Image (cartoon, rainbow, N blue to C red):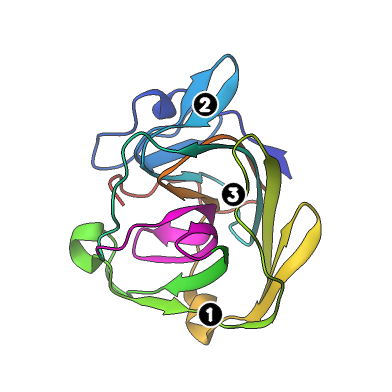
């Protein structure tokens, strides 16, 4: 497992058609992740990033929750959500697995597959292709309070996904077979949440950054 300190591309967000990795391997494809006093912070309402070169089957995100972002932005579907979580097997913004800790409107762990074969940019797939994954076993999870620090981790083994918070398993379930075809790195996603983060991803996978603006 490797912990990535992320600075260069994160300072202003990546504006090119393809994100350029920082020296540590982070590709910020939407929003910005900034370095403040050696800590990586999220203050933008919409942030998407992946660790280039990670395998994408497992990752952990340690974060300190700092409350809502100053500006709140609805999703493309029109829904307003406050959440932070992991991207697994993230080929691009159209094809990946999400493991999200949703704070509002209803707290809990939400796992979904976004699959749009042959499509690779937001302009091509938009909000289409989402499939919520039902849990076989799940524990109710409350939203954190500002100032709390937690670690969200997730691992895919075969068709099974397991998620934990602070080392305790809170979600287990079976992924749809469409997830077998996904091949990309691990990363982080946030919506309307301010946080200090430390993302850890392991394995060796594709090194290229996905298209920016996902």
Residue density around tag 3, few if under 14, some if 14–19, many if 20 or more, within 10 Å = many
Q: In x, y percent, where is residue 27?
A: 44, 39
By secondary structure, the bulk of the magenta-drawn segment is best described as strand
> What's the residue at 53%, 84% (across, down)?
176
Q: Earlier in the sequence, mark 2 or mark 3?
A: 2
Q: Secondary structure at mark 2?
A: loop
CA distance for labels 2 and 3:
14 Å
Q: Earlier in the sequence, mark 2 or mark 1?
A: 2
Q: In x, y percent, where is residue 5?
A: 60, 28
Q: Closer to the camera, 179 or 47?
A: 47
Residue density around tag 1, few if under 14, some if 14–19, many if 20 or more, within 10 Å = some
On the image, which quarter does residue 115 sit in?
A: bottom left
Q: In x, y percent, where is residue 212?
A: 30, 44
Q: In the image, which residues are magenta?
A: 78-106
Q: Which residue is mark 3?
A: 54
Q: Which residue is mark 2?
A: 23
Q: Secondary structure at mark 3?
A: loop
């Amino acid at each position: 497992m490797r912990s990535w300190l992320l600075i260069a591309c994160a300072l202003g967000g990546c504006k090119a058609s393809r994100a350029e990795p920082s020296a540590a391997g982070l590709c910020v494809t939407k929003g910005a992740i900034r370095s403040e006093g050696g800590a990586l912070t999220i203050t933008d309402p919409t942030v998407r990033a992946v660790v280039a070169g990670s395998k994408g089957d497992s990752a952990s995100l340690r974060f300190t929750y700092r409350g809502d972002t100053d500006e709140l932005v609805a999703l493309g579907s029109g829904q307003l959500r406050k959440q932070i979580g992991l991207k697994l097997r993230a080929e691009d913004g159209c094809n990946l697995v999400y493991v999200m800790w949703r704070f509002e409107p209803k707290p809990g762990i939400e796992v979904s597959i976004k699959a749009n074969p042959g499509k690779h940019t937001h302009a091509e797939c938009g909000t289409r292709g989402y499939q919520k994954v039902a849990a076989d076993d799940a524990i109710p999870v409350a939203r954190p309070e500002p100032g709390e620090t937690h670690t969200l981790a997730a691992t895919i083994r075969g068709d099974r996904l397991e998620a934990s918070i602070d080392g305790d398993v809170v979600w287990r379930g079976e992924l749809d077979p469409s997830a077998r075809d996904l091949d990309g790195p691990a990363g982080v996603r946030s919506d309307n949440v301010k946080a200090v983060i430390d993302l850890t991803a392991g394995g060796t996978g594709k090194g290229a950054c996905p298209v920016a603006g996902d």
